Image (tube, grey):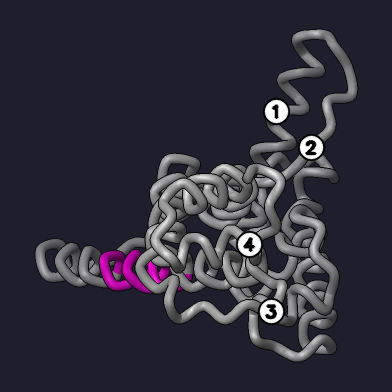
Amino acid sequence: MGQASDAELMARMQAGDRNAFGLLVDRYKDSMVNYLTRLTGTRALAEEMAQETFLRLFVHRARYTEQGKLGAFLYRIATNLCRSEQRRQRRQRLLRLGLFAAVNGSAGASAGGSNGHAAVTGVTPQSQLLAQEAQDLLRRAITQLPLRFRVPLVLHEIEGLSYQEVARVTGCRENTIKSRISRGRSQLRRRLEPYVNGAGELSGETS
């Protein structure tokens, strides 16, 4: 059954076969965790959200209509979970700021970490440290992008989905996806430019 198609496994799962569900989880868990890690910047949170993604697939399995697009369906669930988590964090942040302002008469804000790819260009300890620093900067730069740019950029550039597949996952038109990926790339370049030029820190631009 491990060689069965997604459609066959979904049909078995809808009929109550938990082994089929387990095979689907094994088939997609790594890509879901990696995708969510790049969106959230936190692997632990990504793993929790990936579990929730598969749980929702199982709970709502009867609603799934086979169109040969289970992967896109899972990415869509994961993306919606990420959006919900972002809204939750924003509400908590606003609450914290409001409480801080009430006690101290002022407010502050905080920034998080991120995810992405970087190539190790050498084997010396110094080069490895520089490569890790570059990777951390890229991760942070990706998670600082607005979600509307971050999602299509990660899906296309890192997960390898075509423009058409990204459009299907996000529910946007293909031209919109191309535009958002282009703008996301531009923002990444601007954010990383201070580091490349030796300033040593990322730009805080969020437009």
Percent coordinates x, y for residue 41 in the rendering: 53, 48
- The residue under label 4 is 8
**Could you tell which of marks 4 and 1 lies nearer the N-terminus?**
4
User: Which of the marked residues, 4 or 2, is nearer the chain's N terminus?
Assistant: 4
Relative to 165, residue 10 above or below: above
Residue 99 position (above or below residue 200): below
Reading the image, the residue beneath label 1 is 132
Q: Is residue 90 magenta?
A: yes
Task: Please tell me which residue lies in front, 15 or 34.
Answer: 15
Q: Which residue lies furthest to the top in this view?
A: 124
Q: What element carries label 3?
A: loop
Cα distance, mark 3 to mark 4?
12 Å
In the structure shown, which secondary structural element does the residue marked by tag 2 occupy?
loop
State the image coordinates of residue 182 (x, y, percent, origin top left): 84, 74
Identify residue type, mark 2.
Answer: Ala
- Mark 1 lies on a secondary structure that is helix
Which residue sits at x=51%, y=54%? 40
Please provide the residue range marked out in magenta.
83-93
Mark 1, residues whose alpha carbon is within 10 Å: few (<14), some, or many (≥20)? Answer: some
Marks 3 and 2 sit apart, C-alpha to C-alpha, by: 35 Å
Determine the main secondary structure of the stretch shown in magenta. Answer: helix
Residue 152 at what x, y percent from top left? 71, 70
Q: Nearer the viewer, residue 28 or 179?
A: 28
The residue singled out by tag 2 in the image is 118
Spatial CA distance of label 1 from label 2 is 8 Å
Q: Which amino acid does label 3 sit on?
A: Gln
Q: Which of marks 3 and 2 is in front?
A: 3
Residue at label 3?
A: 67
Figure check: 59 above or below 48 = below
